Image (cartoon, rainbow, N blue to C red):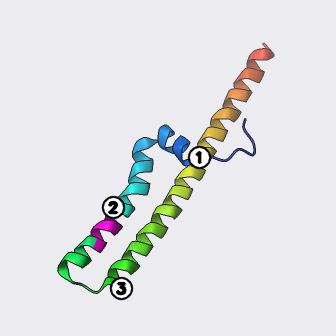
Amino acid sequence: MSVGRSLSLVELFRATPATSSLLALGPLALAVGQLANSYVNGVSPAVSVGFAAVMVAFAVVAMRHHASEYRLRRLETDLDDDRESAADSTR
């Protein structure tokens, strides 16, 4: 069981690429698309910048939640493996 080691973003993308991509890149793509849409159509940038800021904040919060779920799942797997190895050694 690894204690005190932080989870890197690259490790999270390697472990769960689809979920990580959707949570990180999806909101960022929406933000960029909204900014481009605002520029092309001449809409006030205040609305688009606000939307982009909310999407970036959402991506950060969603990735932190996803990382904590992954760490918890990995910790539970490590604990189950430790229990199984302890049970095997007593047999």
x, y percentage for residue 7? 62, 46
x, y percentage for residue 78? 67, 33
Predominant SS of the magenta segment: helix
Q: Counting other residues with Cα less than 10 Å from the Cα at mark 3, is it few (<14), some (14-19), or many (20 or more)? A: few
Of 35 and 78, the residue lying toward us: 35
What number of labels is visible?
3
Q: Return the residue at label 2.
A: 29
The stretch drawn in magenta includes residue 30: yes
Figure quadrant of residue 3: top right
Amino acid at pointer 1: Ser
Label annotation for residue 54:
none
* Precedes in sequence: disc 2 or disc 1: 1
- Asked whether the beta carbons under mark 3 and mark 2 sit within 8 Å of each other, the answer is no
Residue 85's place in the image compared with 32, above or below, is above
Instruction: Report the residue at 51% width, 62% height from top.
Output: 60
Q: Residue furthest top?
A: 91
Amino acid at pointer 3: Ala
The stretch drawn in magenta includes residue 24: no
| First to last magenta residue range | 29-35
Marks 2 and 1, Cα distance to the nearest angstrom?
22 Å
Instruction: Report the residue at 48% width, 69% height from top.
Output: 57
Q: Return the residue at label 1.
A: 8
Figure quadrant of residue 5: top right
Q: Return the residue at label 3.
A: 46
x, y percentage for residue 84? 70, 24
x, y percentage for residue 41? 18, 80
Q: Quadrant of the N terminus?
A: top right
